[in-house]
Amino acid sequence: MVAPQVLIGFGAAILIPYMNVFFKYRFDISDSLLGILFSLSSAMIGVGTVVGPRLAARLGGKVRAVAVTQFSSLVFLLVMGFAPMLWLSAVGYFDAYRLDEHGLAFVFRFLHGADTRAPAGFC
């Protein structure tokens, strides 16, 4: 269980710090629009936190939810990187970021065991 998390951590450490550079130079956007883009991605995490437990239940458990969210995150990263338009790349970024954070939440919850006393809205 350690090796996949180490690989994801190294990948994120290499990729995430340069997201602003990617959007700034690929699409020539202003700093204010870049700030709005990043704040909306954080808001997507909040929305996803509410939806996450329902997603895990619908997919049949946390392990399947981890697999689906991590794979989908990679697909959306590819969409983000190869999209010719800003709006499509932004949607790819929002979904990749949201799904990656969901996957990590499911992994941590799985590794630490389920606490049945946890509120239903939290993963």
Image (cartoon, rainbow, N blue to C red):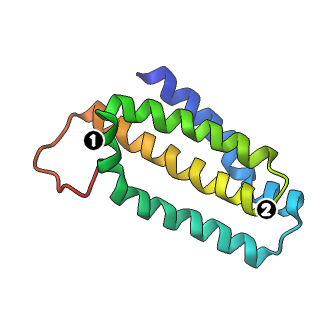
What residue sits 53% from the left and 64% below the top?
42
Answer with left or right where residue 111 lies relative to residue 19: left
Of 65 and 18, nearer the camera is 65
The spot of residue 1 in percent (x, y) is 40, 22
For label 1, the crowd category at 10 Å Cα-Cα, with few meaning under 14, some 14 to 19 and many 20 or more, is few
What residue sits 67% from the left and 49% below the top?
16
Q: Residue furthest left?
A: 117
Q: Amino acid at mark 1?
A: Ala
Measured Cα–Cα span from mark 2 to mark 1 = 33 Å
The spot of residue 65 in percent (x, y) is 38, 35
Answer with left or right where residue 61 lies relative to residue 75: left
What residue sits 38% from the left and 44% below the top?
105
Disc on res. 90: none
Q: Tell which circle, 2 or 1, labels the residue nearer the N-terminal end.
A: 1
Of 104 and 27, nearer the camera is 27
Disc on res. 57: 1
Disc on res. 86: 2
Q: Secondary structure at mark 1?
A: helix
Q: Secondary structure at mark 2?
A: helix
The spot of residue 33 in percent (x, y) is 74, 75
Q: As displayed, is residue 74 above or below residue 53?
A: above
Q: Amino acid at mark 2?
A: Leu
